[in-house]
Image: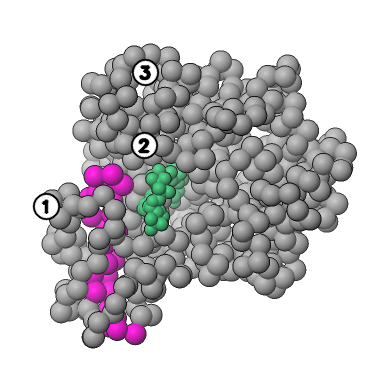
Amino acid sequence: MNANLFARLAARFPADRAAVFLRTPGGPDLKFGALCEGAGRLAALLRELGVAPGARVAVQVEKSPEAVCLYLACLQAGAVYVPLNPAYTPAELHYFIEDAEPRVLVCDPRSASALGPAAASVGARLLTLGAQGEGDVPARAAELQAMGDVAMRAEDDTAAILYTSGTTGRAKGAMLSHGNLWSNARSLHRLWGLQAEDVLIHALPLYHTHGLFVALNLMLMTGGQVIVLPRFDAEEVTHLLPRATVLMGVPTFYTRLLASPRLTRAACANMRLFVSGSSPLLASTYAAFEERTGHRVLERYGMTETGMNASNPLEGERRAGSVGPALPGVALRVVDTQGRVVTPGKTGGLEVKGPNVFAGYWRNPEKTAEAFREDGWFRTGDLATLGADGYVTIVGRDKDLIISGGLNIYPREVEAALDALPEVIESAVIGAPHPDLGEGVIAVLAVSGDPGDVVGCLRKSLAPYKLPRHVVQVDALPRNAMGKVQKAELRTRFQTVFTGTQATGGRD
Ligand code: MLC
Ligand code: AMP
């Protein structure tokens, strides 16, 4: 049997290929027939370019119907899809391209000249998406016959590599197999009761697990409709709610929706399901949303490496502050520092096992070995409690990680960029509660002389979402007897930077 995710999704597409899949406000609709045709032509192009099953195709493009076709084309051709955030700087991208060694790199026409050398260094063919021109992928594919077959893939063949930064060292490519993605989509589809009549507002990025595998794969297998927005805009989303039934978002979506007077019970009357994930949804947001709209946001928990692990139920108790029980077929346990399972309700490290869990990090056996226990349990790095009733509560993180607006920022990476500035003696990067983003990034610096525009300097090497929103200078960083920087003390000291009197919406 062909375990290719494309084959499994396509088998569920509506028989009526005139049914609309993607709606783009102000743009043309994309029907399932055109989706298959577009993907098939792009798959034919990939094949013509020598992309054999297992070869990587790196894609750094803006969100569009063509980008969705390209994702499906990679699956159909058996290629490994490597999505990259368009906000990455050339310096960040060079690393990903060298590491992934793609056979083909598809980018926005504006980035083509900057990415040329990196593509050439690994022998990748550079193509563009988004403007008519010689290297334009859809224009080239238009001349070809759509690929009629689907490349044979086994359950554990890699379908995609998603880069995720590490608490130490460089970013790692998480290898997700066709089986991982299918099992997770199937579980969530059943659990959330998705139907062909559902209409999802898609305002998430397409290069992360949430927007790509949870939102898009689920709607592909449901045969429902997706309203595609290039980015989240609370006014536009409230305007579209009466035409939709499902919204999936990060907690920032819900706090921003609540700030809009247009979010009313009447606006949500057609809605069936609001899903939140990628970072903690505050119980206060949950309560305010229910009071305003009558809807209880369904919170679920996942990771790039595992897809979704736990979810509150569709029917039954949705508990504020909890991410619900483990998904069917997924095993979760909470262990102490020795790896012993703790008694129910006690806090410890959360570990997971199941068909959703990735095979390992691309060409990185050391990091893979560190991430798994010998008996196969994957260490999430999250701290949690698991109640006797199976409900999981994420209470913190055992990893030095900031989640801002659902995007992961690794302090080590920002500190390395800060430490490279000549005036910076030492730096510590921490997260503090932020009313809009959940957590905001603070850089604490000990300097000699005037470092000038620190954030401006970092802009050259780091994607903008990683930049500190508050920079503070201290004489020296607090250290413990072992010489380790005491981040907990800094977090306490700067706890109210974004929520107290010094709060700002933008950067300081
Ligand atoms: C944008 N900016 C951010 C940011 N997003 N800064 C910090 N944190 C963020 N999340 C910066 C931009 O670089 C820019 O900086 C400025 O803020 C305004 O940009 P914007 O484009 O107007 O931002 P906005 O559209 O408002 O985006 C905010 C957001 C978006 C929260 C809507 O970040 C978003 O869609 N987040 C979702 C991320 C996601 O999909 N996460 C799932 C990961 S998968 P400047 O300096 O240029 O002005 C995962 C697993 C799981 O975690 O469980 O799902
Ligand atoms: P990523 O590596 O981008 O996939 O982010 C995964 C991390 O996001 C997890 O390890 C958690 O720390 C966090 N996360 C995802 N969903 C939730 C949630 N519902 N509540 C709390 N944290 C979450």
Nearer-the-camera pick, 66 or 223? 66
Q: Residue at horizontal 56%, vertical 15%?
A: 197
Ligand 1: does it lie within 8 Å of the C-beta at label 3?
A: no
The spot of residue 222 in percent (x, y) is: 60, 23
Instruction: Give the numbered dot on residue 267.
Output: 3
Q: Residue at horizontal 56%, vertical 58%?
A: 173
Q: Is residue 364 left or right of residue 381?
A: right
Q: Residue at horizontal 22%, vertical 65%?
A: 487
Quadrant of the rendered image containing residue 298? top left
Circle 2 — which element? helix
Ligand 1: does it lie within 8 Å of the C-beta at label 2?
A: yes
Asked if disc 1 and disc 2 are in contact, CB closer than 8 Å, the reply is no
Disc number lying in front (1 or 2): 1
Q: Is residue 358 left or right of residue 298?
A: right
> Please, what is the dominant secondary structure of the magenta stretch?
strand
Residue 426 is a magenta residue: yes
The spot of residue 286 in percent (x, y) is: 27, 29
Q: Which image quarter is the C terminus in?
A: bottom left
Ligand 1: does it lie within 8 Å of the C-beta at label 1?
A: no
Q: Amino acid at mark 3?
A: Ala
